[in-house]
Image: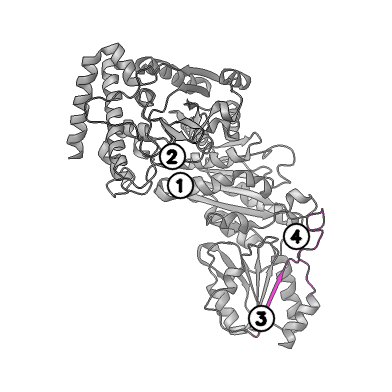
Amino acid sequence: MTYIEHINTLLRIQVGKLPLVIYGQNITRGSCLGGFTRGVLPGKGGRAINTTNAESTLAGLGFGMLLEGQSSIFFTKQMDFLLLGIDQLVNTYNNIRSASDQKELGSYTIFPITVDSGLQGPQSSLNTFADFCTIAKIRGYTLTNKWDAGRILSRHLTAPGFRLMTVSQRMFKDELLPLPKPLWVGKDDTAFQYYAGDGATVVAFNFALPQAFTLREELKKAGIAAALFNVNSPTTYDCGKIIESTNKTKKLIVLDDSKSDNLPHNHLLADDKLKPLTLRLVIKRELKKDWLYPVKDLLEIDYKKVVEKVCKT
Amino acid sequence: MTLSLQKLGERVVWLRTAQLMINEEYRKGIFKVPIHLALGHEALAVALESVLSRNDRLILTHRNAAYNLARCQSLQAVRDEYLLKKSGLAGGKLGSMNLANPVRGIPYASSILGNSFPVGAGVALALQKKGKGIAISLGGDGSMEEGTFYETLTFAKAQKLPLIVLIENNKWSMATHISERRAPIDLTLFARALGVSYVHLSGNNVYTYVQALKKARAVAHKNGPVLVEAEVSTLGDWIKQEEKGPRLINYHSGPAPTVTFGGTIATIRRSPEDPLQVLEKKLGAVWLKKSVSKQYHTLRKELL
């Protein structure tokens, strides 16, 4: 099953349970956002609305419903479009959470697609989920595989209060990563551990889990058992187990495919519980001169070189 | 049933007196949070408050003083909120510009121009789903310049939302008059272009305002969004001596420097721009004088 087929199946189940208002542009028309929202319908008494093109207003609608106890999900085709709704994400959300009794609020989730294939051109080059989450300390979740998607959607999609969630367009047609059941899940489902290992600690951010998974496989071939983590929330994530693992292996390899200067892995590197390391390798996007042109948006890794480095230290 | 002009007039006077008492203390520097008084908006605020049904919701702007006072009927609660006391209307958590009162149907107030229109539409959508109540989202002639004004009305029309978008047109956005910043916008034509009902209010007669708003409420509940434009004068302006000569400064926020109150005369402008002047013409100078005195003593008693 592909990544998007799996997420779509989970959405159909979760959304169909409740009388939600789901809305957004073309959510039940055409390709249904590339299959993301195909067949996704709310339970009895709910509504699905194909809206006007008005992202600022669409971002605010959900907050109005939330205040009135009505739960909703705003699906949007591109995370870039959500830039038009920043006022609502920051000012309205701050206003509401400062004074409201969370128990009396409805649920509101904004669910954009991170358009990270890189071929759309300069106006669609924003791929860093953290840029949205950190602007007002908004809880956000990336969905990267069957395990985190299942847990996060079932526990947070329609929970009271507000959050952001996102999927990676680049991964839509990929087969789901063959990951085992998580060994550990961080507080509020902000991070997941998939493998244990004493040889190195590999941690993925944003949508770099596929590369991190491959790196772990390559390290295994070289006889190094690496622990593998994925951080799903860019703000205030639980990195307790990651630090514990790193302090044991003394080798930390971070993979972050964010293009922004606002890199979520910096919180981990700055944590004062992290002891001195023998290897600290940060693999992030090196933006070339053509980064604003329609070129493939991919974190490229020389796996052989990385494995050699880990073996040498 | 609509209250008599006299009963409504008492409420208008109470609201004016309460705002004047805040202004007096504001002039003494008692309040630290920025307050946007709405002297001159009293007839509209009282009329709107009196047409709200139990399930209706009011979504306000930073100039929410008149509506919050009219809705909660307590100067003490609002004053304490401005002083950021726990006994304040919102427990001292919101201050002035974002002051809301969910228990009395005011779930949200925004200090960002145009921000509250979409939130109001969301509230209206939830109410539509429940099958009861309407949302009334306020803005001014400044916020209607924001894109969300158009976006919200377009969406609300498409979904036939029970929503009134009420524009308080005082012709000023901070210190800039409409004529200094844009071409005039004919909201009659604007509403017609979107297929939205339009209601125009002017003259500050609280009784006729109630009648018009009742009708607008019924239309919004049954047929979808209504755009109401109310002409208001935000009173409290003064003349500033500048290098190029004297310049009118329309009241925006802070204490109104030229407005004073000693407990007897509450009228600020001798024209229909002042709702109290309108009441004086309808009910007489003696009635107004007695009413101001009565409301002042009631409010002083509350604060004691």
Spatial CA span between label 2 and label 3:
51 Å
B141 with respect to B266 (left or right): right
Q: Does A99 appear above or below A236? A: above
Q: Earlier in the sequence, mark 1 or mark 3?
A: 1
The amino acid beneath tag 1 is: Asn
- Nearer the observer, A44 or B56: B56
> Is B255 in the magenta?
no
Spatial CA span between label 2 and label 4:
45 Å
| Residue that label 1 marks | A95
x%, y% of residue B38?
38, 31
Please report the residue visible at 44 percent of the width from the left and 31 percent of the height from the top: B250
| Residue that label 2 marks | B108
What secondary structure is found at the residue carrying circle 1? helix
The nearer-to-camera label among 1 and 3 is: 1
Q: Earlier in the sequence, mark 1 or mark 4?
A: 1
The amino acid beneath tag 2 is: Tyr
B288 with respect to A98 (left or right): left
What secondary structure is found at the residue carrying circle 4? loop
The amino acid beneath tag 3 is: Ala
> Is A297 in the magenta?
yes
Is any atom of residue A35 visible in this view? yes
Spatial CA span between label 4 and label 3:
26 Å
Spatial CA span between label 1 and label 3:
44 Å
Please report the residue visible at 35 percent of the width from the left and 48 percent of the height from the top: B32
Decide whether the magenta segment is chiefly helix, strand or loop: loop
Image mark for residue A175: 4
Which range of residues does the magenta coloring cover?
A: A278-302
